[in-house]
Image (tube, rainbow, N blue to C red):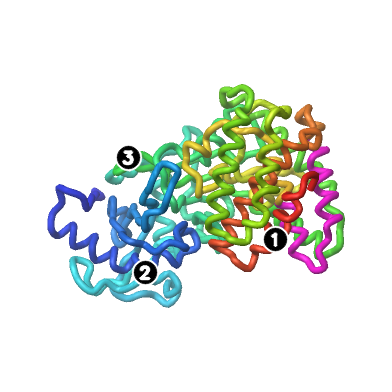
Amino acid sequence: MPKTITPRPPVTSGTARSAASLTELLREWLPAQRWFAGKDRPVTDLSVLSMTELFPGCLHLLVHASHAPVPTPGGTQPPGDCYQLLLGMRRDLAPRLERAFVGRVEEGPFAGLAVYDALHDPRSAHLLLERLRQPGTAGPLRFEATDTARLPGALPPRLLDAEQSNSSIVYGDAYILKLFRRIQPGVNPDLEVPGALAAQGCARVPAPVAWFSTSAPLRATLGVLQPFLPDASDGWTLALDALARGDDFTAEARELGRTMAEVHLALAEAFEPAGPDQLGRTVDDMCAQLEAATRSVPQLRPFGPGLRAAFGALAGCDSGPPAQRIHGDLHLGQVLRAGREWFVIDFEGEPSRPLSERTAPQSPVRDVAGMLRSFDYAARQRRPWRPEWARRCREAFCAGYAARAGWDPRKKHALLRAHETDRAVYEVLYEARHRPDWLPVPMAAIERLAVWGG
């Protein structure tokens, strides 16, 4: 029977030594991972919150990384994040696992063992699927599946290499398992929302068939298994291919707009409506993000007055459609096209935001603005830049959306501009932290949006 070890009092000295021997390795390895959120802040402390033997040679860990305190509106708050890890251990590391190598333990119960990211190990990935095929518990971990799920065994696993904030394993081109790396308490929206939409009969979102969660030291979703669309291409790839060929993309953008409106309508039915959006609170949130971004990215400072004006223009304007559950992080990489159909994936929202904020009702204009910004991102991947391509896609998307939703985002000019501006500010902060070479892309939008009517 798998055992759970929690390196917090009361613990045995042997358990504490096991955790300590791993934290020394993880302190250097963890910040170098693509999904680590605190790259711009040194780790001041690393602690193992829970450690479970998932199967022989593989440990499931939840670790907490703390950072130096930073000023917040309410005072000084020491930030930190909880991360999910699956660590394999072997005496001798196979050559195929060298790129997953974390380090070799020098002392304690694991002394002499090579530690590696077990998601790169086909054996570990296969055994993880077996746990999902046989619902039950492993210490604080609970594995569950839908009543109708009939998961076959012996599906070859393949870890996706795509740059993302989580890790995904494809099993036999039939299913995809997303493991959330940054863990927050509560049910993850990427389980909650697709499940609710499936109950509504919405076919635009793959429904979850299995998932697993933890009950200690916090209750949280850890991973979700969904059908995989093997012949699908993501919208980002399709857009870049169209740009490379010099092809028009408006027909695809228009149908994508209709699809997103269909999903928004289904979300409004699946979750209790929240009523009119509170514009005052929205403006306050937008201004708070701008202030935080300006402190971190000096390039934003000259545009501050114009950006605040974009938010201030919301005062007294039409609040637009009622607030509701939305996608929360919509862009071309979050949609798939299989045949002539579009599908929407990744309802987790922006991982950097608190879970309570990501699940709160918001204006659907926020999603529309995210997709419009994504068309601009795609257009700027080619030289020379093709602003007309992006403009036509934006118009087509809004037209398709309006035809299905019954209201036109283009007629909510102040609202749409404010949400686009807010999205661009978020992009500036993200790129400055993670991809500095991409910073000119959102900064170009900042220059445009800081001028009224941009």
Residue at 57%, 31% (x, y): give it. 361
Q: Is residue 126 visible?
A: yes
- Label disc, if present, on residue 451 of the rendered structure: none
Main SS category, magenta section? helix
Tag 1's secondary structure?
A: helix
Tag 2's secondary structure?
A: helix
For badge 3, the amino acid type reads Ser
Residue that mark 1 sits on: 441
Tag 3's secondary structure?
A: loop
Would residue 256 appear left or right of 181 to someone viewing this image?
right
> In the image, is residue 375 part of the stretch drawn in magenta?
yes
Q: CA distance from mark 3 to mark 2?
A: 28 Å
Q: CA distance from mark 2 to mark 1?
A: 31 Å
Residue at 72%, 29% (x, y): give it. 317
Badge count: 3
> In the image, is residue 159 part of the stretch drawn in magenta?
no
Residue that mark 3 sits on: 215
For badge 2, the amino acid type reads Glu
Would residue 166 appear left or right of 264 to someone viewing this image?
left
From the viewer's side, name the closer residue of 329 and 297. Answer: 297
Q: Point out the frontmost of discs 3 and 2.
A: 2
**In this rendering, is residue 39 above or below 183?**
below
Residue 285, x across and y down, in percent: 56, 39
Q: Are marks 2 and 1 in contact (CB under 8 Å)?
A: no
**Picture quadrant where residue 91 is located:** bottom left
What is the span of residues highlighted in magenta in the rendered image? 374-401
Residue that mark 2 sits on: 28
Q: Earlier in the sequence, mark 1 or mark 3?
A: 3
